[in-house]
Amino acid sequence: MSKSNYICAVPFQAIELHDKKRFLCCASWLTKFLPEEVPIDEAWKSTEADDIRDSILDGSYKYCDDKQCPFLNEAAKPTANGKLKPLHLKSELPRELKKDIKNYKEGKLGGPKTVQFSFDRSCNLNCPSCRVQMFIANSTQIKEIELTIEDIQNKYSDSIKTLYITGSGDPFISVGFRNFLRTFDPLKYPKLEYIHLHTNATMWNPKMWESMKAIHPYVKTCEISIDAGTKDTYENKTRLNGNWDELIENLKFISTLKDLYSVKTSFVVQNDNFREMKIFYDLMLSIFGLKAKVFFGKITNWGTFTEEEFKVHKIWDPTHPYYGEFVRAVNAVVLKKQVFHNLQEFIKFKESKNKLL
């Protein structure tokens, strides 16, 4: 079914906040960005934001990369009921989204319902696909993070239904985010329904979780970035400074959390790990069962690789020497239940004539 049959709710309801940058969606899925270094409310109501929203309404999606966005990627194929979150058939728009679109057309769009805290890159891992070195915020940066959280609370506490933490670092490593989660006061967010945690899970252990009791009823979904199916690949290639055995113990603990009903485990597909896609899938289902949503996404160069280095990692390039093997690996797993991906173009694809080494 064509993407023009759908309305994406994200630009009308969500905003991502990075250091000085703001996005209406994942940065790697868009070709148009919001103004930098302006107040959050100015970015939300900017001309650039309206351009993106208008492209959704006219069905062109001209600022969206449908080969990167897994929702648009999936929209290219039939589904059982025609519903793909956050895409909605124009004939079946949820009442709230209808209201948001009506308000937008009348110049009365309210504040974002989902706010993503991605303004602290602090993380204990040094993953080559993400950064060139470890980063931990200093005291000045921590103060700025706390002021940003306070600004969000003052401006949007009456509209926020979902807080997404984080996407650029780790919520359990960031001092600012960790303090926010430990001292969280739900009365300051009266409409809040969910807190979605995006983490590497290396510090999501019973002791850490016990220190954040106030958020327990709100953490119903999460995303855990792993990028490997074996100890060797995890510790020596994709997740440098990580400990595989500790990770697995933490994943088993997370699987026992009764309020958590959906666990998205993500795997950035690259030259170093593509042969472990099926191993990863089987492992995640063995730990999380029906809670598991296994995501496979193409590697993106965030500036951490030179052009020549990225050619080696970009396994999905038809000129890559292992491309044919990669296509077979994709088709062995992505059509399975509970899989989510942006690899639609490689499904049932003719094998490359490249020699497999």
Image (cartoon, rainbow, N blue to C red):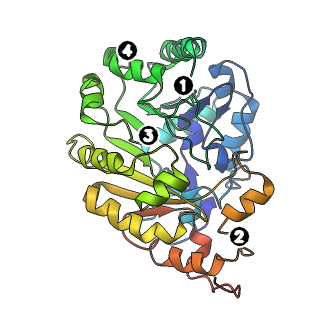
Q: Which of the labelled discs sits on residue 188, or is there none? A: 4
The mark nearer the N terminus, 1 or 2, is 1
What's the residue type where badge 4 is placed?
Answer: Lys
Labels 4, 1: front one: 4
Q: Nearer the viewer, residue 246 or 327?
A: 246
Please identify, in this view, whether the residue under mark 1 or under mark 2 is nearer the observer.
2
Query: Secondary structure beneath disc 3?
Result: strand
Q: Quadrant of the rendered structure where residue 3 is?
A: bottom right
SS type, badge 2? loop
Secondary structure at badge 1 equals loop
Disc number for residue 317: 2
Give the residue at mark 1: 111
Nearer to me, 215 or 157: 215
What is the x, y in percent for residue 344?
A: 57, 70
Q: Whole-percent x and y of residue 120? A: 56, 27
Dot 2, crowdedness within 10 Å: few (<14), some or many (≥20)?
A: few
Mark 4 and mark 1 lie on one chain; the one further toward the N terminus is 1
User: In the image, is residue 92 above or below residue 138?
Assistant: below
Give me the disc on residue 199. Answer: 3
Q: Residue at x 20, y 46 (%)?
A: 256
